[in-house]
Amino acid sequence: MNLIQIRRDLHRIPEIGFREFKTQQYLLEQIRSLPQDRMEIAEWQTGIAVKVSGLDANKLIAWRTDIDGLPIEENTGLAFSSEHTGYMHACGHDVHMANAVGLLDRLIENPIKQDVLLLFQPAEEGPGGALPFRNWLKSERPDLWPDEIYAMHVAPELPVGTVSTKPGMLFANTSELFIDLHGKGGHAAFPHFTDDMAVAGASLLMQLQTIVSRSIDPMDSAVLTVGKFTAGTVQNIIAENARLEGTIRTLNNTSMMKMKERIEAICKAVETGYNCRISIDYGASYREVDNDAQLAEHFLEFASSADGITAVRADAAMTGEDFGYFTEQIPGLMFWAGVNSEFGLHHSKINPDEKILDFMPGFIHRYFSEL
Ligand SMILES: CC(=O)N[C@@H](CCC[C@H](N)C(=O)O)C(=O)O
């Protein structure tokens, strides 16, 4: 199989959460092009579950890949750039998918002892596909409930050939954040007849930035990012509406609750101070990715002795991953895999090194062969 071609084909057609229709069709074509005798395919929404029977299985091992792209305009100048204006695989899920197809190909060609379940999961970037996919497996397909689950995430800042993970929490607790402000707008020349939601929103944005520095224990960690701020309609009308869209990241639930408490208190104060109405919606929240300690140690030991692989003990990161909903109920492990890109995750110029596809499926196949 030409995994680089598969990655490039997928890179051209990024689709956001639960709208991965072309992606699902493309993946199904690739999956169905392989010998089917040891394979069972199930579709779930825009996702796919593929079970490959092992030779003498006493457990079911799952490999999960995410399949969605992001709403960002690509700026790499690559010949195989996104054909979907305003959307891009800027988080490496194209690489993740090609890698998973490569793993499937190897499992079919060189069967291993255990049964393997490949999960092609929609909507990792939002609103979250892991939780409903997990719930579907549990209620509708308990025969596909795995004993262990694994996943990787590309790491632009690490060299190709490096894998990195840790026991316990790898990725943070997250909650999306959407705040709408509504107040009196009007003519640009008569601000004294208005309440100006552009000013109220800007003030709110700045005040939210005091939460981490003033309300969270400095020995703890948290992030509040507002990635999108919109207000008004045109340059000479004072805004009637404003909207802040962001995300909150913490290392524990107590800090998450504290952050939300402070957000609500600040919003109340802005309502009074700027004579407006504010509504808060926390959107989707993801559980932290909690790596099983034994699986993590075993993986790091295996990787340290694998040819061409450098194994590094990771620090926890404030990235979010709905893979945490799998590790909540199934012993699991996620690891970073180096792809050496000058531009990072969620950047319009990210360009993962495709060399990872030459060895990663084989590396995971060898690892799974030992389980
Ligand atoms: C790996 C990665 O980049 N994941 C995303 C997950 C986003 C979850 C949700 N939409 C949120 O923003 O809270 C990330 O931004 O870390």
Image: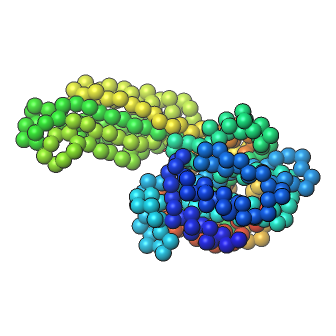
The image quadrant of residue 77 is bottom left
Work out which residue is located at the far bottom of the displayed protein and give it.
79
State the colouring used for the structure image.
rainbow
Left or right of 139 in this view: 56: right
Residue 30's place in the image compared with 122, above or below, is below
Residue at horizontal 54 percent and vertical 30 percent from the top: 254
Whether residue 340 is situated above or below residue 282 in the rendered picture: below
Indicate the quadrant where residue 193 lies.
top left
Residue 265 x, y percent position in the rendering: 36, 26
Report the number of discs.
0
Q: Is residue 333 above or below residue 205?
A: below
Q: Residue furthest right?
A: 56
Q: Residue at x 50, y 71 (%)?
A: 80
Please state which of residues 14 and 205 is positioned toward the viewer in this rendering.
14
Location of residue 266 in the rendering, given as x and y in whole percent from the top left corner? 34, 29
* Horizontal and vertical percent position of residue 84: 45, 61
Picture quadrant where residue 138 is located: top right
Query: Which residue is more in the foreground, 116 or 34?
Result: 34
> Which residue is depicted at the point 48% across and 54% down?
70
Taking the spot 43% from the left edge, 64% from the top edge, the residue there is 74
Image position of 53 (left or right of 20): right
Please indicate, yes or no, whether residue 327 appears anywhere in the rendered image. yes
Observer able to see residue 158: no
Image coordinates for residue 1, horizontal then vertical, percent: 71, 71
